[in-house]
């Protein structure tokens, strides 16, 4: 069995210097790897390159054994439902003029061609699991709090049963107590679905709570650390 | 000496969908040379308290209670009289540094402008500016003074707005969410800066934040806000060591370093608050008696806790 995700010598440049260079790692199902770095270190760009939302300048990305950095168009589109991204600003990832029920059912309606009501019915166990009430899905995004929107995003993303999720600072805009709620929900869903997660954050304490290993990005260089090495590195940053 | 005394502060916003009670019966005080931190989550009414102190509330707000600065009542003061205090004696470190700086003016000049208002002689302007910047842990104050805001990082811009506030030599600094949106390194630099202000200059600071760790590291006293009211107030070391209110306990347990144990439920909306204890639905040990009566703030020799189960 090949690893779920294998990254080899990945490299990205915008022409005026490297965003990152020589990024290599593998990730198995159920595992979480963290991407850590300060503002502007390129961790979000790396996350986007892993999902081919942005084209890397060099190197290879393998997903379930297929080299996805080589394919485009229809073939890539067929893989997309199995790899998903959670963004930092959930409120801008939802169409403000669509009720939540329309946004949340859209992926399955699109990928499977099912009816909306049918999909919504199927999603009920997931909606209960994230702690939302079905009636809240008849609201517009601006009528809900940040934590509620991020939970609704979780329903939308997990509806596709993805194998890989790239979470780009999913809780940095949320309150402490809401962050704890959303992250422990993410962990539960990950355990139940055996999902692989790439978790992007600049908070070393959140990293320590969420990840099995951490890749640190600093000035374009990528260093893979186990959790005890990372806690030593984070301690160094505190001084 | 108390520099700031807030007593029974109520702030209500009338809206078409009813009254929003953003701040209810809030009472606390700040001693001279002390750092007082008010901690609260979104919708806890923390920013409204800062705005009330600075006379920056919208005209529609219904305000009652008392705010005394240096013994003088400021809540009912006329705008003309208050204008002599704001920016001179009481200065604000704003929440959004990028929106508060002039993008077309060099950073040093933005500090010097305030010094000119204090009639600092021209030949001393650059020296004074450098002195203020060095307090703020800028590695190269001269380079910073010659830069434009866009050339600084988010953390440096935040410290620069602090410098502008300090330039007026205020007796009270009000800092609104100083670490919001900063990454780990910038936040640490900001915490180190506030430490310097506290230890070397003995500034009186009222800080409003959602950042518990900042409160623990900087605060002499800390107040915890929930749904518009204070639920706990006391010396920071004691509050963090032995929290009295179940909400404070829940917040501390939800920190990543303490294992991120989630609290159940959400805050009640400010327009439809329940009758009794606002925290009742989320409390691990809800009271069985007096459900409809609102708990009072209990005094445990300098520790104030709004919970019937609290005892010293």
Image: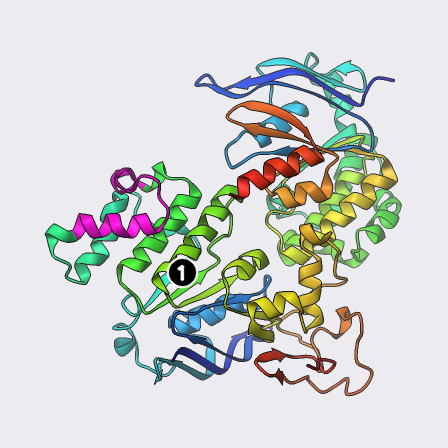
Location of residue B124 in the rendering, given as x and y in whole percent from the top left corner: 14, 52
In the displayed structure, B116 sits above or below B130; it is below
Quadrant where the N terminus of chain A lies? top right
| Magenta residues (range) | B125-148
Q: Quadrant of residue A201?
A: top right
In the displayed structure, A137 sits above or below B224; it is above
B278 lies left or right of B110 = right
Residue assigned mark 1: B199
Of the pair B66 and B183, the residue shown nearer to us: B183
Q: Residue at x 46, y 76 (%)?
A: B61
In the displayed structure, A225 sits above or below B239; it is above
Crowding around mark 1 (Cα neighbors within 10 Å: few <14, some 14 to 19, many 20+) is: few
> Can residue A151 be found in the magenta stretch?
no
Location of residue B152 in the rendering, given as x and y in whole percent from the top left corner: 37, 39
Residue at mark 1: chain: B
Q: Residue at x 60, y 24 (%)?
A: A222
Location of residue B69 in the rendering, given as x and y in whole percent from the top left corner: 36, 79
């Amino acid at each position: 069995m090949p690893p779920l995700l294998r990254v080899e010598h990945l490299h990205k440049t915008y022409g005026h210097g490297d965003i990152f260079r020589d990024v290599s790692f593998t990730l198995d199902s159920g595992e979480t790897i963290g991407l850590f770095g300060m503002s502007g270190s390129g961790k979000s760009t790396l996350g986007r390159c892993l999902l081919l939302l942005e084209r890397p300048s060099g190197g290879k990305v393998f997903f379930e054994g297929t080299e996805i950095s080589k394919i485009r168009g229809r073939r890539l589109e067929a893989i997309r439902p199995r790899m998903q991204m959670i963004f930092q600003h959930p409120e801008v990832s939802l169409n403000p003029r669509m009720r939540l029920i329309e946004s949340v059912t859209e992926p399955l309606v699109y990928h499977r061609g099912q009816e909306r009501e049918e999909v919504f019915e199927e999603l009920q166990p997931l909606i209960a699991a994230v702690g939302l009430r079905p009636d809240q899905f008849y609201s517009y995004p601006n009528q809900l709090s940040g934590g509620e929107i991020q939970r609704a995003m979780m329903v939308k993303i997990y509806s596709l049963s993805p194998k890989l999720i790239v979470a780009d600072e999913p809780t940095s805009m949320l309150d402490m107590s809401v962050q704890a709620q959303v992250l422990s929900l993410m962990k539960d869903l990950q355990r139940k679905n055996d999902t692989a997660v790439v978790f992007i954050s600049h908070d070393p304490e959140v990293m320590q709570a969420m990840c099995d290993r951490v890749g640190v990005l600093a000035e374009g260089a990528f260093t893979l650390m186990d959790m005890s090495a990372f806690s030593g590195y984070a301690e160094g940053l505190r001084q | 000496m108390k520099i700031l005394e807030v007593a029974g502060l109520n702030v209500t916003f009338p809206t078409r969908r009813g009254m929003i009670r953003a701040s209810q019966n809030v009472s606390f005080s700040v001693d001279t040379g002390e750092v007082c931190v008010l901690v609260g989550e979104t919708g806890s009414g923390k920013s409204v308290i800062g705005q009330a102190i600075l006379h920056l509330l919208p005209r529609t707000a219904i305000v009652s209670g008392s705010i005394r600065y240096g013994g003088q009542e400021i809540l009912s003061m006329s705008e003309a009289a208050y204008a002599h205090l704001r920016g001179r004696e009481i200065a604000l470190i704003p929440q959004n540094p990028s929106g508060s700086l002039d993008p077309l003016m060099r950073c040093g000049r933005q500090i010097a402008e305030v010094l000119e208002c204090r009639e600092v002689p021209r030949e001393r302007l650059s020296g004074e500016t450098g002195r203020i910047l060095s307090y703020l842990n800028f590695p190269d104050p001269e380079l910073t003074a010659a830069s434009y805001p866009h050339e600084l990082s988010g953390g440096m811009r935040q410290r620069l707005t602090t410098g502008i506030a300090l330039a007026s030599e205020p007796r009270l600094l009000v800092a609104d969410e100083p670490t919001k949106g900063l990454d780990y390194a910038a936040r640490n630099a900001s915490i180190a800066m506030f430490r310097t202000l506290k230890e070397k200059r003995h500034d009186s600071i009222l800080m409003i934040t959602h950042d518990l760790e900042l409160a623990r590291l900087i605060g002499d006293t800390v107040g915890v806000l929930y749904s518009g009211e204070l639920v706990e107030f006391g010396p920071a070391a004691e509050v963090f060591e032995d929290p009295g209110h179940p909400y404070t306990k829940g917040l501390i347990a939800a920190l990543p370093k303490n294992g991120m144990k989630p609290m159940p439920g959400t805050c009640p909306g400010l327009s439809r608050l329940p009758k009794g204890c606002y925290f009742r639905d989320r409390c691990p040990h809800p009271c069985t008696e007096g459900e409809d009566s609102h708990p009072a703030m209990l005094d445990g020799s300098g520790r104030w806790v709004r919970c019937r189960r609290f005892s010293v």
